[in-house]
Amino acid sequence: MSIIRRLFQREPDPQAITVSHEGVPYAVELRRLPQARRFTLRVRAASRDAVLSMPARARLADAIGFAERHGAWIATRLNRIPEALGFAHGAVVPLRGVPHTVVHSPERRGTVSVEEGAILVSGDAAFLSRRVQDFLKREARKDLEAATRHYAKRLGVKVTRIGIRDQASRWGSASSSGAINYSWRLILAPPFVVDYLAAHEVAHLREMNHSARFWRIVRDLCPGMDAAKAWLRSNGATLHRYGAD
């Protein structure tokens, strides 16, 4: 590499910076995006941090200054995220939108069952959290697979694979190959929210965009989409509080 080239080569950006507000530090991840035309900030409930997106050629100093000027905004929104709640004995967890109490019942046979507003977990207490989460993932797969197959049949599209993950930034995703992934945390939401997300991702198998045509397809599949979207805007972040040990 020539001396001149080295002189003009930009130092790599740090992966994240720290912004302080009223003496409290907040982590901000930095991302350069080729399509970005301005600085944008968003917070992530799952990781309880902020992300600053910036144009590919933006100066790092300008990005840091932008984040620092918005320190109060970052602090306010991060502090609105509910505290994490583990799957411990006595914890109240929504199952399909209905509050259920986690109850450790070591003498019971089997692993996990649901009775009269309680999630009953057998076995050693050390495995209680993992067993609850595994149970919720199985229930999520069952509901989401049924809803996805239903809407795929209605729309006449082929779903090649359905995956259940713990996606931090979105509730679902679809690829042109017919693969659809969902967040298992949707089992915590009311069934009409699950229906909407399934209709949304299945519609992407016809329209891989968010055009007006896409939204017409979604509304035709799921007339109650507006209520589901409103629920997610108001309550979606809270679904990420559950499951921390």
Image (cartoon, rainbow, N blue to C red):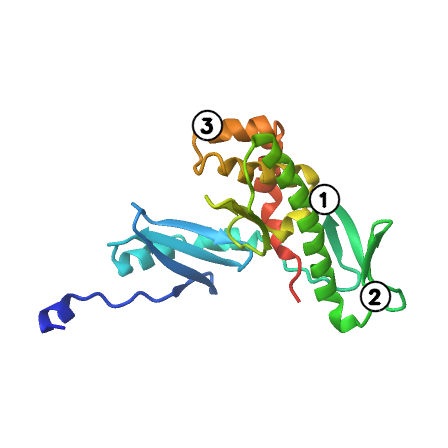
Asked if 134 appears above or below 181 in the picture, the reply is below
The amino acid type found where label 2 is placed reads: Ser
- Residue at 69%, 45% in the rendered image: 143
Could you say where residue 206 lies in the image, as x and y percent from the top left?
A: 48, 34
Three-letter residue code for mark 1: Gly
In the shown orientation, is residue 29 left or right of residue 129?
A: left
In the shown orientation, is residue 156 left or right of residue 194? left
Labels 1, 2: front one: 2
- Residue 95 in percent (x, y) is at 74, 49
**Residue highlighted by disc 3:** 213
Q: Residues within 10 Å of mark 3 (few under 14, many from 20)?
A: few
Residue of label 1: 97
- Residue annotated with mark 2: 122
**Where in the figure is residue 211, as x and y percent of width and height?**
43, 31
Q: Report the Cα–Cα distance between label 2 and label 3.
A: 49 Å
Q: CA distance from mark 3 to mark 1?
A: 31 Å
Residue drawn at x 48%, y 31% as measured from the top left? 214
Alpha carbons under labels 1 and 2: distance apart: 23 Å
- Front residue of this view, candidates 215 and 151: 151
The label nearer to you, 2 versus 3, is 3
Residue drawn at the location 79% of the way across and 64% of the way down: 89
Along the line of sight, the residue nearer the viewer: 100 or 158: 158
Q: Identity of the amino acid at label 3?
A: Arg
Q: Secondary structure at mark 2?
A: loop
Q: Which comes before the other along the chain, label 3 or label 1?
A: 1
Categorize mark 2 by other alpha carbons within 10 Å: few (<14), some (14-19), many (20+).
many
Which quadrant holds residue 242?
bottom right
Q: Rate crowding at label 1 as few (under 14), some (14 to 19) or many (20 or more) other CA atoms within 10 Å.
A: some
Image point (13%, 68%), residue name: 5
